[in-house]
Image (cartoon, rainbow, N blue to C red):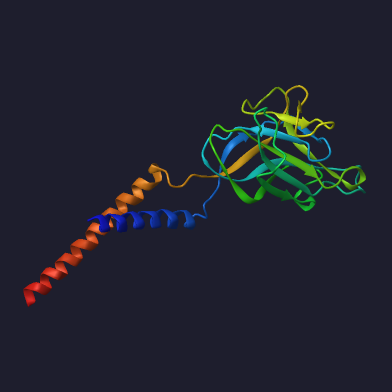
């Protein structure tokens, strides 16, 4: 019986894995801050970003940012390649220097004429925990006449779970300057929810048990028929 139980659990897990594989482990939106009143540039270098608080356990696979290409004019390049780094926060609420995930977007993804939502996928997903704040930070590859990124943002603290910030130039990764007038970026986080929760496991487990019982009944009938024929 114990052996059959192990087989049943393996079948259930296989069914769950297969169901997620069939859907491509599709990411869902966890944190969403869609409000914006316009676009603006950010502090140069890897110093500007946004804190946020995950609401679910799972794999954080990327971010969705509202970006428009900044340019000196119609004859100049617009936008910039950019690197987005995900960081954990230290006990003082300041992002730690070592990034836990890195993603990129490129000048060719950006429109010079209007803001555009861009999905920035991380090279390696990060296992986030509900209620544990994180921060993402953005670094443009170019600026000035070579083009830069403008980001959708909103004044008045539209997102209560975090805030836009700038690391102080004189002492980065030690203190932060909160963005003036309590701004937030327009952004969303893309997460594959923790798959092996009971709510997902139970239906597959019940299905596997039902299939296993039907299979065993069929086997038992064949054994009984074979014995009767002897």
Residue located at (67% from left, 29% from top): 93
> Residue 199 sits in which quadrant?
top left
Depth check: give the residue in front, 32 or 112: 32
User: Which part of the image, by quadrant, shows the N terminus?
Assistant: bottom left
Q: Residue at x 76, y 21 (%)?
A: 181
Reply above or below: 93 against 208.
above
Q: Is residue 37 above or below residue 217?
A: above
Residue 47: where, in percent of width, then height? Answer: 78, 36
Report the residue that reaches farthest toward the bottom.
230
Q: Nearer the viewer, residue 58 or 96?
A: 96
Residue 12 seen in the figure: yes
Query: Can you say which quadrant of the picture contains the C terminus?
Result: bottom left
115 left or right of 29 in image: right
Tell me which residue sits at (72%, 50%) in the image: 104
Q: Is any part of residue 178 visible from this angle?
A: no
162 lies left or right of 25: right
Rendering coords of residue 43 (x, y %): 82, 35
- State the residue at coordinates (67%, 37%): 187
**Which image quadrant for residue 183?**
top right
| Lateral position of residue 214 relative to residue 44, left or right | left
Total number of numbered discs in the rendering? 0
* Front one among 36 and 212: 212
Residue 64: percent from left, percent from top: 66, 42
Residue 130 x, y percent position in the rendering = 53, 35
């Amino acid at each position: 019986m114990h052996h059959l139980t192990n087989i049943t659990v393996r079948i259930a897990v296989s069914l769950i894995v297969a169901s997620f594989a069939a859907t491509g482990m599709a990411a869902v939106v966890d944190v969403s801050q869609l409000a914006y009143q316009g676009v603006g540039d950010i502090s140069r270098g890897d110093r500007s970003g946004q804190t946020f608080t995950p609401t679910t356990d799972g794999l954080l696979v990327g971010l969705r940012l509202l970006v428009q290409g900044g340019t000196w004019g119609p004859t100049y390049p617009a936008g910039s390649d950019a690197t987005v780094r995900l960081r954990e926060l230290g006990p003082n609420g300041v992002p730690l220097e070592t990034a836990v995930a890195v993603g990129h977007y490129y000048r060719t993804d950006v429109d010079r004429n209007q803001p555009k939502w861009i999905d920035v996928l991380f090279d390696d997903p990060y296992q986030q925990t509900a209620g544990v704040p994180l921060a993402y930070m953005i670094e443009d590859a170019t600026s000035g006449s070579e083009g830069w990124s403008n980001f959708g943002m909103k004044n008045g603290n539209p997102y209560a779970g975090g805030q836009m910030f700038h690391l102080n130039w004189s002492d980065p990764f030690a203190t932060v300057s909160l963005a003036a007038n309590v701004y937030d970026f327009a952004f969303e986080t893309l997460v594959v929810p923790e798959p092996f929760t009971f709510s997902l496991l139970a239906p597959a487990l019940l299905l596997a048990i039902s299939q296993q019982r039907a299979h065993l009944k069929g086997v038992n009938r064949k054994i009984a028929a074979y014995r009767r024929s002897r």
